[in-house]
Amino acid sequence: MPKDTVASPSPPEPVTAKGEQTKQAILDAALALFRRVGYEATTMRAVARQAGVSVGNAYYYFASKEHLIQAFYLDVQADHQERASAVLAAETDFGARLAATLHAGLDALTPYHAFAATFFKTAAEPTSPLSPFSEQSSPSRDASIALFAEALHGSSLKIDPQLRSEAPELLWLTYMGVILYWVHDRSAGQHKTRGLIDAAVPMIEQLLSLSRLRILRPTTRDLLNLVATLKQ
Amino acid sequence: MPKDTVASPSPPEPVTAKGEQTKQAILDAALALFRRVGYEATTMRAVARQAGVSVGNAYYYFASKEHLIQAFYLDVQADHQERASAVLAAETDFGARLAATLHAGLDALTPYHAFAATFFKTAAEPTSPLSPFSEQSSPSRDASIALFAEALHGSSLKIDPQLRSEAPELLWLTYMGVILYWVHDRSAGQHKTRGLIDAAVPMIEQLLSLSRLRILRPTTRDLLNLVATLKQ
DNA sequence: GTCTATAGTGGGATAGAC
DNA sequence: GTCTATCCCACTATAGAC
């Protein structure tokens, strides 16, 4: 099985320590510039200059300007993981666990709010390897879904057993929705998104609980069938 | 009140018949090229050449390459409106009306599926005037929401009265979700998205009906409060 | 108001020398 | 692995024709 598609060959992973250093220097320079002047205004020439390398060298490690975003994405993902795990270790109430996981994601993203708008734009491109739904993103997506599985399964909440296995993916989708709202959120400190989480979490908790009600059984089954079909 | 922001001055609307013709020729050329070679590979030089005008003239009518997408968006919007109205005139069942409205949207978009990926990417940029959530898009967004209001209010479905007024916006959001899935849908003829609509519509219908149940009253209220807060 | 031609800027991306 | 030189294209500026 080929490692890369024809469309987007990956740059080589650095093998020497020096190469690793160079790559990191380029990434650091890029993220610093992104935060300071935004994505569009950051030129590859400026990134290279700030990193102390040539433009060609920057392209040796990052296939395109957009690929710098992918590296950023992995960083934030790891940060989210770390922040969430800290809270999840000491909490059993589902609502609190879910809220903490969602808030932790925003905490990790917050320094990049202005730039995240463009990040999201790029991620929305279906043909892009940066899309959260793409093949290439599946490792980090799976890790993110696993985080929501942990939030659910480590809690005391009782829900419909079949829903139990699909719920993490649905919670991840909810997280994507939260991020979508957050990216558009112009309120101070994005407090509206924080409010959205706090208001939505009890509703989600209630809906999951209600999934055990007999009247909702058919709807729950329909939903699960639909999710199964769409994933394929 | 100034007509334009400093950031993005609008090109002049053509006043003469000839100008109107020229603008249309440029748009037609652009859409044809988008369908044939995609958005990225379409150069403004090629658009101008195919339209038989100079590059400067193309920029006289469209402030940027992205603004050609906005024009495309308006076209599709009008097409959606037209297709949906035809069906809505002869149907009273809510499920059928909603399904028809959603399918009509995809029908209007289908010729552009490959290109729509990039279109969606651009629309997802929150700071872009092309974002479906932006200020500038509100006329076409309002029109789109009105379409879903018509689908609901012209039907015989009975739902919670307070939900009734907010539902069109929620249905429009659902439509945005469908488009998001459709854009990523690589199945032949995007049949998976069609299946998504057919499976989701009965569930939505049932959920709306259930909104009158007493057990769900508090959740319904919570949901409405949340929506109200988020819109502000 | 509409349109052309031309010359330029600046930035993403690449080729090929070292 | 790294650089320099170069290409291409979005976009701008300008000066003027009709």
Image (spheres, coloured by chain):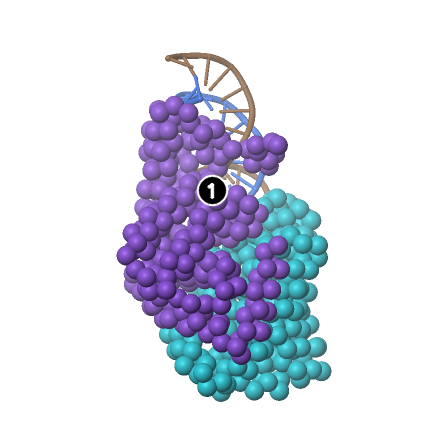
Chain colours: A cyan, B purple, C blue, D brown
Vertical order, A118 against A226 (above or below): above
**At which x and y percent is residue B76?**
37, 47
Seen from the viewer's position, the closer of residues B155 and A1 is B155
What amino acid does circle 1 point to?
A: Glu
Circle 1 packing at 10 Å, graded few (<14), some (14-19), many (20+), is some
Judge left or right: residue A207 versus residue A97: left
Q: Is residue A182 left or right of residue B188?
A: right
Q: Is residue B125 visible?
A: no
The image position of residue A55, as x and y in percent, is 58, 47
Quadrant location of the C terminus of chain A? bottom left
Chain hosting mark 1: B
What residue is rendered at 57% in x and 33% in y?
Answer: B4
- Quadrant holding the N terminus of chain A: bottom left
* Pointer 1 residue: B66
Residue at screen point 44% across, 48% down: B143
Q: Secondary structure at mark 1?
A: helix
- Image point (67%, 73%), residue name: A100
